[in-house]
């Protein structure tokens, strides 16, 4: 957990369930692109928020619950899809990558903001906190992209350059906006948790 406040196991379970549901909603808000099987969606924002607000342990659990719910067939993945076949398909590496991404975001925010009060602060400390949150989210996104792109190459037998053109480059501007929004939200909301 990012803060020093202690919750009961029941509260943590409820928060993990809430963030898993938020992740499903973020994943369902998607725009399919004609040139790639990877849609534009808000799932990376959900990953940033889960890791940034719940920390490495509970953020990872929340995203793992989302992935498991989808794996058993409940249509929580983009375009209302579910089932193990989605995870075995070309976008499965990105979905699994959300788990690693949430862990890294939570871990890095815990490390970068260790000892800092979760209360809102002013001035340079506020800017450093915002940049720390953004840096952690960039690292989580890189991990998600790496795992997802490797799996995409493996399942589609696409070359690395073609995979980057299809699955990474078109998404960078939107993901930059999600990182900005996620960093601001984590900085504003972490004191509430």
Image (cartoon, grey):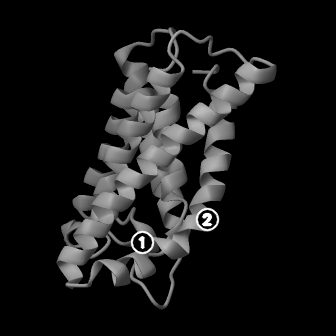
- Residue 149 seen in render: yes
- Residue 62: which numbered mark, if any? none
Decide which of tag 2 and tag 1 comes sooner along the chain.
Answer: 1
Q: Is residue 104 above or below residue 79?
A: above
Residue 8 falls left or right of residue 149:
right
Quarter of the image where the C terminus is located:
top right
Question: Which residue is painted at 45% across and 52% down in the image?
Answer: 141
Question: Which residue is painted at 64% across and 27% down in the image?
Answer: 129
For disc 1, the marked residue is: 80
For disc 2, the marked residue is: 174
Name the secondary structure under disc 1: helix
Query: Disc 2 or disc 1, which is closer to the eye?
Result: 2
x and y percentages locating residue 13 in the rendered image: 37, 28
Quarter of the image where the N terminus is located:
top left
Q: Is residue 94 above or below residue 181?
A: below
Question: Which residue is painted at 24% across and 66% down in the image?
Answer: 87
Instruction: Work out how far the residue at label 2 is from the one at label 1, CA to CA, in angstroms.
Output: 21 Å
């Amino acid at each position: 957990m990012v803060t020093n406040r202690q919750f009961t196991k029941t509260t943590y379970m409820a928060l993990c369930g809430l963030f898993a549901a938020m992740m499903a909603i973020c994943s369902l808000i998607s725009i399919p692109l004609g040139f790639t099987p990877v849609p534009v969606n808000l799932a990376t924002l959900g990953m940033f928020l889960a890791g940034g607000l719940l920390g490495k342990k509970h953020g990872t659990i929340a995203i793992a619950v989302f992935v498991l719910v989808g794996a058993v067939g409940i249509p929580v993945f983009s375009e209302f899809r579910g089932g193990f076949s989605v995870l075995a398909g070309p976008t499965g590496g990105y979905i699994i990558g959300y788990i690693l991404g949430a862990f890294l975001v939570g871990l890095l925010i815990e490390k970068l903001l260790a000892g800092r009060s979760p209360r809102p602060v002013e001035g340079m400390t506020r800017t450093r906190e915002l940049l720390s949150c953004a840096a952690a989210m960039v690292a989580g996104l890189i991990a998600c992209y790496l795992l997802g792109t490797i799996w995409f190459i493996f399942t589609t037998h696409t070359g690395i350059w073609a995979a980057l053109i299809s699955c990474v480059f078109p998404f960078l501007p939107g993901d930059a906006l999600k990182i900005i929004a996620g960093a601001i939200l984590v900085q504003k909301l972490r004191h509430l948790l």
